[in-house]
Image: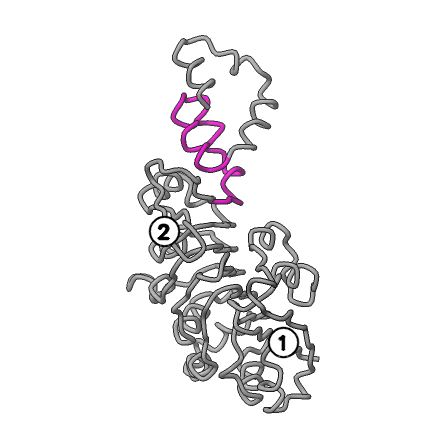
């Protein structure tokens, strides 16, 4: 970037003498934060950097420096780089209408809410790494209460043991209701407890209205990191309320996982096959943490028994609609 700026300042840039195909290939290798800098170099660079194709699928990773725009948050496992909202706005604001898929690291509540409320075409959102994520991240502004989002997939993947999420089942249920195209929800590797009764009550309230009964019919896959409040009746009721639900995955307390990334990636049954997501999750040290490896237990919906859910607290249980 410095080389390109220097050439431009001297008025005779060898860079612009390159074939446009080569320039385009170079531009495609830049991260969003670099594109936002490059677009300010010249009108020619702005034309390249503002191309919609570059902004459809983006990764937002805060730089591991103390430069402006990045906060560092201390945790029990070291510093976490967190985005500042003002910095992210400066990068994304000119391109919000083009963004369809976002993978973002180091977020706060206001970052998540900004992406959801302002990326109007957002279909796929993966959040990796935070210190504390609260209900406010998914409680949208009042002006959005009646708006329908086009999100198709949502993933929350904590990147260390301290990734705490204070989100309850009611908030998650309300957010799912606002996303009639939402098919997949994954919440993994973080400390969170979603109570079945709260989630189901939100869905029951939703289907009581004939006009809104279609809103949760698109949900096909749900993965949540607790089953201590889930009973067989809860599981059966969820499948009843979500007419297209194909798979429910109940996992142990996520902060006790050993090698959760490999478990997810090596078992396509969980539906998380993207190496780009799972590679970002660090593996816990077995000798240090003294945790045992969980097993995957797959069950038919017809075989539900209450005692099974509590007898296998250390395992990942997958329920399928056969």
Residue that protrudes farthest toward the front in the picture: 287
The image quadrant that residue 69 belongs to is top left
Find residue 154 and report its horizontal and vertical position in percent: 51, 61
Q: Which residue is mark 1?
A: 315
Residue drawn 53% across the image and 29% down it: 27
Q: Which residues are magenta?
A: 31-60
Find residue 252 and report its horizontal and vertical position in percent: 56, 74
Closest to the observer, 37 or 240? 37
The image quadrant that residue 288 belongs to is bottom right
Residue drawn 60% across the image and 51% down it: 279
Residue drawn 64% across the image and 78% down it: 319
Element carrying mark 2: strand
Q: Measured along the vertical axis of the image, is residue 57 above or below residue 208?
A: above
Find residue 41 and report its horizontal and vertical position in percent: 40, 22
Label 2, residues with CA under 10 Å away: few <14, some 14-19, many ≥20: few
Q: Measured along the vertical axis of the image, is residue 168 above or below residue 8?
A: below
Dot placed on the residue nearer the N-terminal end, 2 or 1? 2
Q: Main secondary structure of the magenta part?
A: helix
Q: Which quarter of the rendered picture does the C terminus lie within?
A: bottom right
Closest to the observer, 279 or 141? 279
Alpha carbon separation for disc pair 2 and 1: 32 Å
Asked if the magenta segment contains residue 51, the reply would be yes
Closest to the observer, 195 or 102? 195
Numbered badge on residue 73: 2
Label 1, residues with CA under 10 Å away: few <14, some 14-19, many ≥20: some
């Amino acid at each position: 970037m410095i080389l390109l700026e220097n050439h431009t300042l001297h008025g005779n840039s060898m860079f612009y003498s390159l074939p446009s195909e080569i320039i385009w290939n170079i531009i495609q290798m830049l991260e969003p934060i670099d594109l936002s800098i490059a677009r300010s170099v010249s009108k020619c660079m702005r034309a390249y950097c503002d191309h919609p194709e570059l902004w459809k699928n983006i990764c937002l990773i805060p730089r591991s420096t103390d430069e402006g725009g990045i906060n560092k948050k201390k945790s029990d496992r070291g510093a976490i780089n967190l985005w500042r909202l003002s910095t992210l706005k400066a990068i994304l604001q000119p391109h919000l209408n083009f963004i369809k898929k976002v993978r973002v690291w180091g977020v706060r509540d206001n970052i998540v809410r900004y992406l959801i409320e302002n990326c109007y075409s957002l279909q796929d959102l993966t959040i990796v790494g935070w210190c504390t994520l609260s209900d406010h991240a998914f409680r949208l502004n009042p002006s959005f209460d009646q708006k329908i989002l086009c999100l198709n997939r949502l993933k929350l993947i904590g990147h260390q043991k301290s990734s705490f999420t204070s989100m309850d089942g009611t908030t998650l249920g309300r957010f799912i209701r606002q996303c009639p195209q939402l098919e997949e929800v994954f919440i993994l590797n973080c400390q969170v407890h979603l109570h079945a009764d709260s989630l189901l009550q939100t869905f029951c309230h939703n289907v009581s209205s004939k006009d809104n009964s279609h809103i949760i019919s698109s949900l096909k896959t749900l993965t949540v990191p607790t089953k201590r409040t889930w009973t067989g009746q809860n599981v059966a009721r969820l499948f009843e309320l979500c007419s297209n639900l194909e798979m429910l995955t109940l996992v142990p307390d996520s902060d006790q996982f050993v090698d959760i990334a490999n478990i997810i990636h090596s078992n396509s049954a969980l539906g998380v096959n993207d190496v780009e997501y799972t590679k970002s999750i660090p593996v816990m040290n077995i000798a240090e943490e003294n945790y045992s490896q969980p097993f995957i237990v797959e069950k038919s919906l017809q075989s539900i028994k209450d005692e099974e859910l509590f007898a296998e607290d250390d395992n990942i249980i997958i329920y399928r609609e056969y």
